[in-house]
């Protein structure tokens, strides 16, 4: 029997590795957990509460699926603190893991954190302010970016960009870093994504190198973090970033952030961080207008040294109205086709080649857009909306998602129910009635997320979600 259990544990561990990938398994499970089968439980031994909480929040579904696949049935999963897992026998392996993942981070992270006497130089980031196309929808954001570059003591801290994907947030962040590097060569700057920040923080905790982590992020003249909404629902990392921000701010240095949503729309962000973010300059970047899109197309065509008629540029710009990435993707597809067929780019060719591309990038609101906006606001995941969970927060978010899906799409009640986790059409009807009643009465709505209890009026919630979706 013991041998059977051992074989099952090995099989479960391998199944988890297959589901989450070898790198994540090596970091979180190989030397940090001990799996034990007992009665109807799978016990997961962890060295401390932090690692246990992280694994539970991020990998619980994968663990449950692995157990189900190996044992043929569901088992309750319990986490136990086993301090000996963080003992000296594991340290060399953990350090080796940390080195491996740190090298992976260095391949995706560009920074200039060095003492003045250091001689090595890192390659600049890909995007710069010089090739950022300015238009009415992003003029304020560009001017704010220039103000940060031109003044060592910025008038606003932080500078917070938000907007949909492909509107230029990352371009501005990298452009600021490149411009600071050029105008102030001795300045210490760091550009990372919030996910990189979180991963490096976890590694620092596991390898007991928090001092080095904090020195790296806090001793900067400019810290630029992309996709800051990634920190939502991660209380420990929010607290760490709050201290990082306070240290940099008190030193009179600059923080620049980018997010898909306004700080107040990021559901599970603690009030302290929200207050910090809105105390600086918050700038929304809209999708570029037609003239700006034409300029972007022309610039992209010139960079590829291609001869594209202005009529084609205008055709593409007119039909790709949502974001720059789709715009550039259409151009690349068209030029690649012309190159392969050895034909000149023409308007007729553009209409034929891009017909499918345009139909798939229409400006219609999709259910995924609605679920993303609602999940961000209420501080849950889209998986929660699709789940069978019925707690107040998930139920409320699901109801708003169903109501907005009915408003913005042509889907029927059964179709909406099927998309949102195979719910019955009656559930969708009741959700719509519930939200309509809340809005008509402008009722006070309460829910709970990682930051604590939140209260808002039903109409305010509805208007903010509408603005985010539109």
Image (spheres, rainbow, N blue to C red):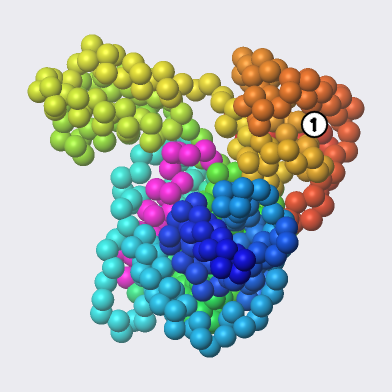
Total marks placed: 1
- In this picture, which residue range is highlighted in magenta? 163-185
Residue 279, horizontal then vertical, whole percent: 66, 57
Residue in the picture at 75% in, 51% down: 449
Q: Is residue 194 magenta?
A: no
Residue in the picture at 37% in, 81% down: 115
Q: Is residue 165 magenta?
A: yes
Note whether residue 81 is visible.
yes
Lateral position of residue 373 relative to residue 217, left or right: right
Say if 2 sits above or below 361 in the image: below
Note whether residue 158 is visible.
no
* Camera-side residue of 347 and 161: 347
Residue 104, horizontal then vertical, whole percent: 37, 64
Mark 1 crowd level (few <14, some 14–19, many ≥20, 10 Å Cα): some
Say if 258 sits above or below 414 in the image: below
Say if 226 sits above or below 447 in the image: below
Screen quadrant of the C terminus: top right
Screen quadrant of the N terminus: bottom right
Lateral position of residue 465 relative to residue 226, left or right: right
* Camera-side residue of 280 and 234: 234
Circle 1 residue: 459
Residue in the picture at 68% in, 18% down: 414
* Camera-side residue of 281 and 106: 106
The quadrant holding residue 335 is top left
Residue 327, horizontal then vertical, whole percent: 36, 30
Disc 1 is placed on an element classified as helix
Q: Magenta region, mostly helix, strand or loop?
A: helix
């Amino acid at each position: 029997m013991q041998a059977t259990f051992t074989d099952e544990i090995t099989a479960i561990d391998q199944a988890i590795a297959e589901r989450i990938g070898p790198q994540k398994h090596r970091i979180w499970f190989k030397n940090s957990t001990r799996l034990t089968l007992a009665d109807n439980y799978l016990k997961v031994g962890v060295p401390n509460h932090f690692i246990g909480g992280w694994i539970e929040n991020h990998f619980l579904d994968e663990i449950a699926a692995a157990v189900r696949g190996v044992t043929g049935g569901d088992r309750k999963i319990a986490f136990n603190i086993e301090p000996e897992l963080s003992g000296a026998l594991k340290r060399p392996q953990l350090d080796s893991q940390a080195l491996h993942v740190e090298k992976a981070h260095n391949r995706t992270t560009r920074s200039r954190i060095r003492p003045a006497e250091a001689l090595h130089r890192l390659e600049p980031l890909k995007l710069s302010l010089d090739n950022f196309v300015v238009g009415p929808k992003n003029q304020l954001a560009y001017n704010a970016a220039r103000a940060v570059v031109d003044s060592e003591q910025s008038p606003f801290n932080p500078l917070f960009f938000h907007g949909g994907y492909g509107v230029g947030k990352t371009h501005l962040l990298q452009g600021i870093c490149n411009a600071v590097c050029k105008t102030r060569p001795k300045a210490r700057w760091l550009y990372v994504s919030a996910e990189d920040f979180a991963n490096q923080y976890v590694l620092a905790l596991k390898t007991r190198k928090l001092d080095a982590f904090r020195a790296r992020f806090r001793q900067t003249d400019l810290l630029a973090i992309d996709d800051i909404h990634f920190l939502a629902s991660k209380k420990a990392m929010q607290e760490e970033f709050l201290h990082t921000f306070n240290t940099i701010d008190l030193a009179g240095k600059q923080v620049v952030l980018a997010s898909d949503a306004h700080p107040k729309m990021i559901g599970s962000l603690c009030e302290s961080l929200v207050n910090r973010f809105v105390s600086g300059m918050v700038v929304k970047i809209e999708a570029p207008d037609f003239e700006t899109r034409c300029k972007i197309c022309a610039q992209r065509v010139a960079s590829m040294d291609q001869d594209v008629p202005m009529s084609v540029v205008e055709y593409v710009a007119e039909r790709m109205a949502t974001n720059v990435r789709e715009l550039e993707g259409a151009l690349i597809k068209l030029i690649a086709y012309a190159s392969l067929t050895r034909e000149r780019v023409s308007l007729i060719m553009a209409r034929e080649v891009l017909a499918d591309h345009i139909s798939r990038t229409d400006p219609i609101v999709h259910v995924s857009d609605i679920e993303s906006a609602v999940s961000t606001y209420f501080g849950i995941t889209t998986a929660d909306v699709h789940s069978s969970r019925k707690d107040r927060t998930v139920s409320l978010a699901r109801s708003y998602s169903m109501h907005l899906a009915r408003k913005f799409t042509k889907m029927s009640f059964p179709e909406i129910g099927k998309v949102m986790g195979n719910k019955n059409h009656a559930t969708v009807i009741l959700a719509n009635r519930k939200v309509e009643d809340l809005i008509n009465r402008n009722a006070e709505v309460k829910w709970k997320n990682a930051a604590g209890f939140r209260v808002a009026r039903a109409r305010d919630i509805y208007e903010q979600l509408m603005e985010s979706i539109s």
